[in-house]
Amino acid sequence: MIIFDKQSEFFRYPQGAIRENSKITLNIYVKRDFVCTPKVIIEKRHDYNKQFYKSFLFEWTGTEKNYDLYRCEFTIKEYGNYYYSFEFGNKQNPYPATHELLIYKNDYNTPLWIKGGIIYHIFVDRFYKIKTNSKKDNINVRNDWGNVPNYLPDENGKILNNDFFGGNIDGIISKLPYLQSLGVTAIYLSPIFEAHSNHKYDVGDYFNIDPMFGDENSLKSLCTESEKYGMAIILDAVLNHSGDDSVYFNKYNNYKSIGAYQSKESLYLNWYTFNNWNDDYDCWWNIKILPTLNKENKSYKNFILGSSGVLKYWLKAGIKGYRLDVADELPNEFLDELRNSVKTSDVNAFIIGEVWEDAANKYSYDKLKEYFCGNQLDSVTNYPLRTAIIEYIKNKDCNSLYETMNAITEKYPPQTINCLMNILGTHDTVRIITELGSSHVPENKNKMAQSKLSNDEFIKAIKLLKIASLLQMTIPGVPCIYYGDEAGMEGWKDPFNRGCFPWENENQEILNHYKFLSKLRKNSNLFVNGKYKCLVHDMGVFVFERYNEDQKIVIGINLSHNPITLNFHENMSEFDSTTVGNKFKIWPEKYLILCTNLI
């Protein structure tokens, strides 16, 4: 009775989130014998409540076969999270569905320089070490690079994360030519501020680079040298919590400051929330070494966001952006001020939020987040895509991938979609080749430490990783390679996913594949802002295109048991091949890259 496809530009234009005051056009087909006066109902969401905003009448525009075509054009002037549904002026409502519609601020833009590139994520202690004068008291660096990280608890049952392999900033500088060979345009560093763990998420001093890694001059040198290779540096900003062993909390008297744990007279007392001073305090996920910071405290906000604050300080040192740890923990007002602080220092600085779910309608602490309304983030960590890719590869069913991409393209702003951080692995996930190649999860950490893929499993995993990385590299967004994934590094969850890079023992087949994908991205500007359209989604078969008015790239993947044939109206050519035609076969567990008019 009613025909409406929210994924089609004909039925809803423009697609994706929409800039405020832009014209929105909706078309619907209504069966001719259904007498009605259709209108669109707009509601605006305020936290968990939806409130009526406006309604707009459709106008009849003509007849096609047995359907009347109705069109409605309207604008929404205020940014926010909206929903639209249809009413038909009678008791029947044959199309009761409600659809999301995100409206973003008129001046919301994202940095152009990051789009079309490749991000490389480095866990600094485990990437590469060069002997320097940098040192840290009471720290012993292991001399067995490449062995299993410590995973056993101490005598008190605590996991201390206090084993160090010695990777440092100078080591990264020495490997810039290698990163350039991968097509890397941005290096995202795990936290580098002074802290007492190997992961550095327990910040001890925001204004000091950890001596294990180097010093401020080391970071400045990295920024300068990286720029020569066409790369920018992104830091991990841990703003939700500090370490208990820090300038600000100073639980163990290791700093000269008077910390909040030591005295109620401390300048930092109200940066934290004590339920009963001083042992009972709020901490992240009840982890006592990570006392939670009060993001509403003016003194703390000024320390981080002010004119002489942490974020501006490191931007002046030469970095080009921040990845915000646990962004869901940062209140909307804090994120609003954060964006203003960063963008007034450098309008082209890149702000990524660590978000694990759909970021267009995320709730945190009973508040609707406003990540993409224009006041907060440029991008998020695209975990939903990672989950969908893995499900497709492992289960040979592309439905989750198809639905995930539909949700992203329907709800996210296009300027955000083109710079989403597309991941297959991070320091918080199982290594991607382990995820794809293992038939079962070891039952405990002792077995995880000893676990390795068999030769047959590894060969199979390489085949699947090639397909997963192809999706990561060609779906809208910016792929982020977790250090060592391109070398075939294995590992279960933390700390086994944080091993040392296997220099001189890289898997060349995987490495060459990543370099091939880098070449593909470099050869077309479609990966900067090309549109996305799914052409086929049928269980194991997933085919999509990236396109604009001048070019087209088609990615076809066949995880079914039978060969399939793709037919096109125009001639296509295989990328990196002389094969040209309008009919192509994809064999089982294979992929195909086709293109027209590649620059």
Image (cartoon, helix red, strand yellow):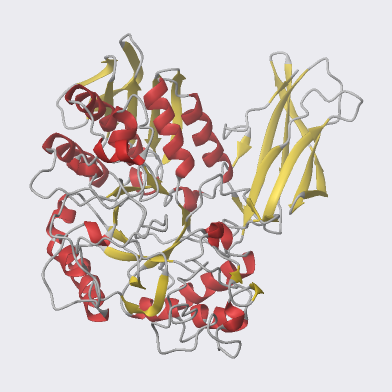
* Residue found at x 83% / y 18%: 34
- Which of the two residues, 494 or 486, is positioned nearer the viewer here? 494
Q: Could one spot residue 470 in this view of the protein?
A: no
Q: Total of numbered circles in the picture?
A: 0
Viewport quadrant of the C terminus: top left
Viewport quadrant of the N terminus: top right
Residue 540, how many percent across, how many down? Answer: 40, 18
* Residue found at x 12% / y 67%: 130
Residue 542, how many percent across, how many down? Answer: 40, 23
Residue 195, how many percent across, how many down? Answer: 36, 71
Identify the residue at the far right of this view: 91
Determine the image quadrant of residue 173: bottom left
Residue 293, how many percent across, how many down? Answer: 56, 72
Determine the image quadrant of residue 313: bottom left
- Which of the two residues, 276 or 345, is positioned nearer the viewer here? 276
Horizontally, is 548 left or right of 298 in the view? left
Q: Could one spot residue 401 in this view of the protein?
A: yes
User: Above or below — where is 90 with respect to 270?
Assistant: above
- Which of the two residues, 190 or 385, is positioned nearer the viewer here? 190
* Residue found at x 39% / y 67%: 321
